[in-house]
Each structure stands twice: as structure tokens, then as C-alpha cells.
Image (spheres, grey):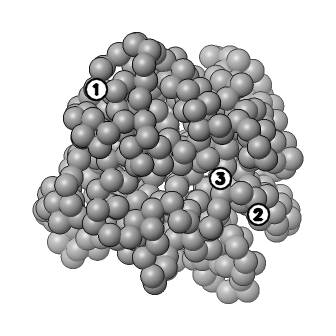
């Protein structure tokens, strides 16, 4: 989501969705993203764009990312644009007897033996990550997400947007948790991807913090309080400065000053673009309600501590939409009268008071709200100790949802 003229908050949106490339029959991962990109571009590239949706590589060679080709003026219709590109990719992958798999974690991938790093342009960045952190783990090799980029035009908009996103972040797993399986069995969490995500750089804890970013009062304070300590901490491990970029920040939302946006990073990829964009619509609405201080005052939002939000976030990784919120500062910031309440109840209130379930965009979101998060639906279908064949059958059904751009 890049632009020359700064965009005001909520004037546009950037959406990114990652997918695993897998064998069409076995659904085992296939490390052929470079061949896919070369086939569509006619040359070795790490990004391809000839329309509203661009394709790009990621750290792992079995992952392909689709993203809006620049800022999109609206979320409306984006799911169909993404779905068209998904079909195009699957057609190109047919000659390799491969396809793309939706969802945030491959349920039985072995990263120790199957991880392959992107070997082409910018591979020096990936090599540095691998040298410092060892990328042969689920927290690097096996996590596909949806990112939402929201713009800001100046210092004041940045601070308000950052404050609003901080309050919203712990509630996102309640809506989007979709990774209950790892190593072929249930992990005991609804959002295993985020558990591996928050721990994958623990050697340099300043990079991720507790996922929830600290509150800042200005862009300058963001640089001094969040970015500078992170760069100091990584420097002994990265003397050439290969990783000295704002993208090193791995908190749940990071400032992308190169884009004039804040990027929300902790949403599990769903079963289809329709489901992803329904999640995005709900998240953007909550953030906007907080940004515009319709749910609560800026002062009330500023009172919520990082530790309180991080504890709530980690609880949501286990309990999803059933997570109970009892802290009065969080409840006040969310504009909730009932005390305590579950995250499911918060999302229902947010959707109702913003009339999200009405009109042309309401059908997909209503379908999402009526269902449990995808993680619970997967567990209900496959169970806690599924056989490999049973798990493969369920994930084939996820592939069908992707093909049809429908809900699982």
C-alpha cells in the first residue's frame, strides 16, 4: 500500500493474504512459489502485478502472497478480485499438480525437513533472519496471515490510529482464530499461529515485545520508544545492518512510514477471500469507531495498559470468542455497558451499533457472526486427535471453500 500523497485515515485500505502452495492430492507443501511467479511474469521475479491484485513471494518458498496493488478506495468487491486471482494461480499450478491451500497453518507440515527459504532477490534478508533465529520452525515456516493496512496523513492521525488499533488487537483472535492444528494434532489453542508468532524471535525480545505495542504520543516517540531499542538489540547479531528496517518490528501492528500506514498483522488467513474480507470489514469498523471516539474517549483508551491488553490477547489465543473481558479499563475503552462480557458479545455489539449486518455488505458478515471462528469449526469436524486421512479430508473441504469463495 504505497502512495505519494499522504492519505487520511480510512480514505483507503491495503489488504494482503498469504496462501500455502501444496500438492493437489496429498496437500503436502510444495516449495515452488518462484516457479509460479516466473511462469506468470515470464522471468524470475519476486513480485508480479498487472491488475488490482499483485502477487509476491514471502520468506518460505511454498508461500505466495496476494495483495491490493496500491491503496484500494473501498473494501467492497475486494473478495471477488482476490478470488479471481486465486483461480488464476490454481490454473497455473495445475501443471505442477499443485494448488493453493487456505488457512493460517498447514496442519501437518514439518518445518525441520520441508522449509525452503526464498533463494532469489532479497534473500540476504531471509538469510539473516535464518542465521539469527533459525527459520526452520513453525513460527517462520508455517504461518499465513491477512494484513490490513490503514493510512494516516500526519502525526495526530498516527497517534489516534495507533491508540485505536492497540485496543482492538486483543479481540482479533476471537473473530479470526483458525489454526487449531500443528504437527498433525490439536495444539490445545485456537490460534496456534499467533502463539508461534509471538515466540519466534524471543532471542531478541525487543522485536516483538508482547505483540501489543506500547502507547506513544507522537511519531518521534514511536521511533525512540519502539524502533530504536529494537535496532540496538539486533545490532550485535546483525553487524551489517541487513535487518535495519521498520519492517523488523514484529508487533501485532507496526508503523509502515514508507507507506504512510499502520499494518495490522495478527489476523489468521481464513478459508476464502469472502471470509477474509468479512473479518476485515469488522476489524476496520471497530478501529474506526475507536479512532473517532464514538465508543469511548481518547483519554479512556489511553488508560489501558500494554500488560492488560497483552494478557487479554494471550487468553484469546486459547479461548477465542469465549474469552471473558472483566478489566474495567478495557470495557470502558470498548464502550461496553455489560460487565463482564465475552469477546463474542463485544463483536455482536460492535456489529449492531454500527449496523454492519445490514445492506449489501452485511450478508457475509452476518454469516461470519453466526458461525464460531474457523478454528472451532475445524475442531468440530476433525476432532482433537484426527488421523492424517481425516485431517486431509477436512482441509480438502477448505480448498473447496476457497474455490467457491464461500464459508466453511
**Residue 329, disc:** 1
Using a 10 Å C-alpha cutoff, classify the residue at mark 3 as few (fewer than 14 neighbours), some (14 to 19) or many (20 or more): many
Whether residue 300 can be seen here: yes
Image x and y of residue 225, in percent: 15, 56
Residue 350's image quarter? top right
For marks 1 and 2, give the CA distance: 40 Å
Q: Residue at x 46, y 33 (%)?
A: 171
Q: Residue at x 71, y 57 (%)?
A: 76
**Residue 389, disc:** none
Using a 10 Å C-alpha cutoff, classify the residue at mark 1 as few (fewer than 14 neighbours), some (14 to 19) or many (20 or more): some
Image x and y of residue 316, in percent: 44, 26
Q: Secondary structure at mark 3?
A: strand
Image x and y of residue 368, in percent: 70, 33
Residue at image mark 2 = 81
Residue 154's image quarter? bottom left
Report the quarter where the C terminus lies.
top right
**83 or 26, which lies in front?**
83
In the image, residue 13 sits, relative to residue 264, either above or below, namely below
Which of disc 3 and disc 2 is earlier in sequence?
3
Please tell me whether mark 1 or mark 3 is closer to you in this view: 1
- Position of 114 with respect to 405 (left or right) is left
Residue at image mark 3 = 20
- Position of 88 with respect to 18 (left or right) is right
**115 or 253, which lies in front?**
253
Q: Are marks 2 and 3 in contact (CB under 8 Å)?
A: no
Q: Secondary structure at mark 2?
A: helix
Residue 275's image quarter? top right
In the image, residue 395 sits, relative to residue 120, either above or below, namely above
For marks 2 and 3, give the CA distance: 19 Å
Which of disc 3 and disc 1 is earlier in sequence?
3
- Position of 220 with respect to 202 (left or right) is left
Which of disc 2 and disc 1 is earlier in sequence?
2
Amino acid at each position: 500500500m504505497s502512495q505519494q500523497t499522504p492519505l487520511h485515515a480510512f480514505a483507503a485500505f491495503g489488504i494482503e493474504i498469504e496462501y500455502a502452495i501444496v500438492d493437489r492430492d496429498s496437500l503436502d507443501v510444495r516449495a515452488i512459489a518462484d516457479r509460479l511467479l516466473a511462469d506468470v511474469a515470464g522471468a524470475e521475479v519476486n513480485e508480479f502485478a498487472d491488475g488490482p491484485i499483485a502477487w509476491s513471494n514471502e520468506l518460505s518458498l511454498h508461500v505466495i502472497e496476494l495483495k491490493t496493488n496500491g491503496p484500494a478506495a473501498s473494501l467492497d468487491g475486494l473478495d471477488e478480485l482476490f478470488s479471481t486471482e486465486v483461480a488464476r494461480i490454481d490454473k497455473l499450478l495445475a501443471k505442477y499438480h499443485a494448488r493453493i491451500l487456505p488457512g493460517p497453518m498447514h496442519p501437518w507440515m514439518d518445518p525441520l525437513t520441508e522449509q525452503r527459504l526464498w533463494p532469489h532477490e532479497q534473500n540476504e534478508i531471509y538469510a539473516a533472519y535464518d542465521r539469527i533465529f533459525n527459520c526452520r520452525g513453525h513460527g517462520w515456516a508455517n504461518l499465513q496471515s491477512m494484513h490490513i493496512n490503514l493510512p494516516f496523513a500526519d502525526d495526530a492521525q498516527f497517534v489516534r490510529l495507533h491508540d485505536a488499533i492497540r485496543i482492538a488487537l486483543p479481540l482479533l483472535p476471537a473473530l479470526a482464530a483458525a489454526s487449531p492444528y500443528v504437527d498433525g494434532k490439536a495444539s490445545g489453542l485456537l490460534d496456534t499461529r499467533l502463539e508461534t508468532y509471538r515466540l519466534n524471535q524471543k532471542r531478541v525480545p525487543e522485536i516483538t515485545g508482547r505483540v501489543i505495542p506500547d502507547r506513544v504520543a507522537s511519531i518521534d516517540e514511536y521511533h525512540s520508544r519502539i524502533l530504536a531499542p529494537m535496532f540496538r538489540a539486533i545490532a550485535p547479531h546483525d553487524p551489517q545492518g541487513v535487518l535495519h528496517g521498520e519492517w523488523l518490528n514484529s508487533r501485532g501492528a507496526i508503523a509502515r512510514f514508507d507507506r504512510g500506514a499502520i499494518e495490522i498483522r495478527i489476523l489468521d488467513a481464513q478459508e476464502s477471500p469472502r471470509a477474509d474480507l468479512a473479518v476485515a470489514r469488522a476489524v476496520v469498523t471497530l478501529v474506526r469507531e475507536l479512532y473517532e471516539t464514538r465508543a469511548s474517549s481518547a483519554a479512556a483508551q489511553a488508560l489501558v495498559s500494554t500488560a492488560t491488553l497483552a494478557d487479554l490477547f494471550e487468553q484469546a489465543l486459547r479461548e477465542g470468542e469465549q474469552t471473558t473481558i472483566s478489566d474495567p479499563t478495557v470495557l470502558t475503552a470498548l464502550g461496553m455497558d455489560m460487565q463482564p462480557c465475552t469477546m463474542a458479545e463485544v463483536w455482536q455489539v460492535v456489529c449492531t451499533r454500527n449496523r454492519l449486518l445490514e445492506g449489501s455488505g452485511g450478508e457475509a458478515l452476518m454469516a461470519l457472526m453466526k458461525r464460531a471462528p474457523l478454528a472451532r469449526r475445524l475442531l468440530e469436524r476433525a476432532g482433537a486427535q484426527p488421523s492424517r486421512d481425516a485431517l486431509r479430508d477436512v482441509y480438502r473441504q477448505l480448498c473447496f471453500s476457497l474455490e467457491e469463495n464461500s464459508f466453511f
